[in-house]
Amino acid sequence: MSGKTSILIYDLGGCEGCPLSIMRSYPRLARIYDVHAKCIGNADIERQYNYAIITGPICLNSQRHIEELKKIRKNSKILIAYGSCASVGGIILYARGGQEPRPDHRVYAPISKIVRVDFSIPGCPPAPQMLISLLGCIRSGRGYFLDLFKAVSAYSKLSGFDLMDEVVLTGICVGCGACVLSCPTNALHMVDGRPDLIVEKCIRCGTCTVRCPRFTQILIQRYKLRERAKMLASLVGGE
């Protein structure tokens, strides 16, 4: 035992962009944490971990992957969904299955459909620094910076469509252009000082929603309201 905080990095499948993103920061992670990952050959889902970082979507037609995910959740104190497929669905929400080598694998979903997720980092892929910063905030207890990542974990889908519905079409967009700059597929462009969505290009990664100052406010406010409602319900139920 190294005495370091233990981390499991576990990929459920996909394009492998997210595991590669994390491996870019592996030297920095390894200095601070005891890192276990499939790609370095020391992943063991039977042992306990402080943090588990999951990449890739869960295939709802694969009982093996579902059981693996449940076991990781049980053996981890904190579970983090890293990347859009794991956190909010992303492009896999367009999947229809029927392809070799497993044509029976038809339905894919973010991992929150199967297990409780503590924090979610959307992105296709996210910048490695986001993971390092999140882990640092968790360790230091800087709760204010954690609210957004907690809030996203309550959603099973976020995309440019939600940005248009919640921010642009409601008239609360400030026209900063952060969403346009963050989109990995150039699915957003500015029209008359406001973003507009090119629907054919949107891969439903949710990156624009967590870069938008207005949408992040909406996500955090809704998260806090849900938590307050849960607390009140527990108090009432305990009487």
Image (cartoon, rainbow, N blue to C red):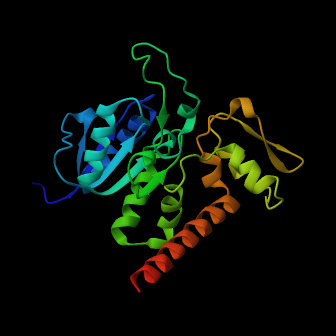
Q: Is residue 182 above or below residue 5?
A: above
Q: Nearer the viewer, residue 180 or 52?
A: 52
Please, which residue is most extreme toward the left here? 1
Q: Is residue 233 above or below residue 92?
A: below
Residue depicted at 49% across the width and 72% down the height: 230
Residue 176 seen anywhere in this rendered image of the structure: no
Q: Quadrant of residue 161?
A: top right
- The C terminus lies in which quarter of the figure? bottom left
Left or right of 134 in this view: 40: left
Left or right of 6 in this view: 128: right
Q: Position of residue 96 (x, y in %)?
A: 55, 23
Q: Position of residue 144 (x, y in %)?
A: 50, 72
Left or right of 218 in this view: 51: left
Q: Is residue 231 above or below residue 112?
A: below
Left or right of 20 in this view: 3: left
Q: Position of residue 147 (x, y in %)?
A: 51, 66
Residue 83 seen anywhere in this rendered image of the structure: yes
- The N terminus lies in which quarter of the figure? bottom left
Q: Is residue 214 above or below residue 84?
A: below
